[in-house]
Amino acid sequence: MKLRLIQIAHARSGDKGDTANVGVIARKKEYYPILVKYLTVDRVALHFRGITFGKVERFELPNLWALNFLLHHSLGGGGTRSLKNDAQGKTLSSAMLRMELDIEESVSL
Amino acid sequence: MAAMRERIRIASGQGFWGDLLTAPYDQVTKGPVDYLVMDYLAEVTMSIMQKQKRRDPRLGYARDFIPLMERILPIIVEKGITVITNGGGVNPESCRDALFEIAAKAGIGDLKIGVVLGDDILGDLQELNARGIPLDNMETGEKLAVVAERLVSANVYFGAWPIVEALSGGAQVIITGRTTDTGLTLAPMIYEFGWKADEWDKMAAGTVAGHILECGGQASGGNFSAAWASVPDLARIGFPIAEAFPDASVVITKHEGTGGLVSEQTVKEQLLYEIGDPSRYITPDCIADFTSINLEDAGENRVKVFGVKGSAPTDSYKVSMSYADGYTSVGALTYAWPDALEKARAADRILRDRLSALGLSFEEVRTEFVGYDSCHGPLSAPETEINEVVLRIGVRGRDFKAVERFGMEIAPLILTGPPGVTGFAGGRPKPSEVISYWPALMPKTAVTPRVVLARGGAGAR
């Protein structure tokens, strides 16, 4: 089935220097395995091409039904160097939630 | 010390320098609290304060703190609430003296204030280098010598323990420099419940509570992505409160009758804010494992946080340094229908042509179209018939004159570029100084926090 990540997850993002972190949280416990299966490092790196110029790291927090992503070199230098409107990556959370997924499983939304 | 309390309430009053000024007043008047903690410091805040101190040796702290305290000081004295803040910046002693002055004015006598000093190592760098402490950039590996001439600030992140010392000395207000945000909240738990430094799970539980409180309203319904429109009455948002218990469980809540929302989802979003490896959240006090956190719904606007695991911290302090790194300038113009985006793109090309004809060069020139792609870049949906768009163009470079000259090239586009343009009320953009961040590590043995307690107020001098 096809869905948008925002239907099954919420998120928050922030900055550490030129690295953004994006925490993605499943809206229901049963959605968490979908996040683990489909939000791979490669899939996220592909999604953020043109925004993220460094590596992507992923960490699992099953206790919070959440994944934490580090997107390196994503903020135009970060801090006061950055010329970006969103120099702190505050909106990269919703950029993540735009992702369109085509999943094998059928979930109730 | 009196018998151990069964519960203490720690209220978040400020999440950054510039936060809602009414929040601390609401926290101390709308319900019971024992501690009010206020976090003021972000990565580059210390450099701003260092510059202010250079201009006036009595400045260099979060000046907002003083009028804010003027309003609440009589209340906190009457109710016996203790205030803990890192708003002392690079000049905690001046901040304290300013507070004594308002206490005297308000007729409050015998106020005891503790300050935590020793984090500012800007004057000690050569000596530290000579002692074999390099302070190289912990992320890039670059040598400190690369930026040594351009350093603006250098501060060690201290943890909870100097604050615990000040609490033990009877301080009613504690003003620190660069203390971790989480240490402000952990300290009263250590003090009240008599926790030992090597009770790592407890250190971690207090650290997690501190992480939840450190951004103020962002844990109680602000910036909430799961269901923003369902958050009640954000105009009167109640900032988060941690009810802490001796067994290291914590309930996150807010005062009754305030707006906002505390739910498992709002707490989860804040837990994931600005973290790296969640199994190793490193502070001077411990390493907290965020993958061990349990959350449980404990009633309306109440979330229990328990079972947190921790381990011993590293033997290093993190040092936050900053250095001058050139200039930026950003200008903006608004283009209206028809062809709003095409016209903004044309204006961008014209402007860039003119900059190169002037022989100006920059490290970076960046163009974004606010209303179209400034947030999500290439992920933005295809344009349809856009009503209006803001051309936002910025430059960064080492040459002040070139960056300044750029600012003079924006307004001329109004009469010499594409039509349907407006929004230049702010005047020419001026160059801003870039302050870049230089994180480093140093052995904990190389620096010692100093706690100074002083009495003042009405009749004290």
Image (spheres, coloured by chain):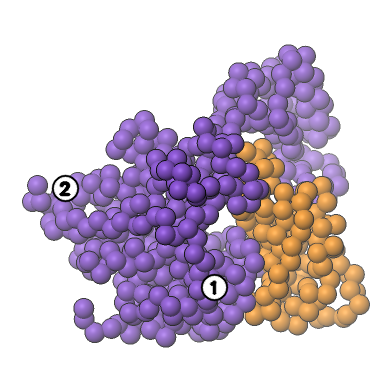
Chain colours: A orange, B purple
Q: Position of residue B325 (x, y in %)?
A: 58, 33
Q: Position of residue B54 (x, y in %)?
A: 37, 33
Residue furthest front as drawn = B131
Residue B105: mark = 2
The quadrant holding residue B370 is top right
* Other residues around mark 1 within 10 Å, as few (<14) / some (14–19) / many (≥20): many
Disc 1, SS: strand
**Comparing labels 1 and 2, the label whose residue is closer to the camera:** 1
| Three-letter residue code for mark 2 | Lys
**CA–CA distance between discs 1 and 2?**
43 Å
Frontmost residue, B318 versus A47:
B318
The residue tagged 1 is B288
| Three-letter residue code for mark 1 | Ala
On screen, B243 above or below A101? below
Frontmost residue, B363 versus A9:
B363
Q: Quadrant of the N terminus of chain B?
A: bottom left
Query: Which residue appears at 16% of the width and 56% of the height?
Result: B455
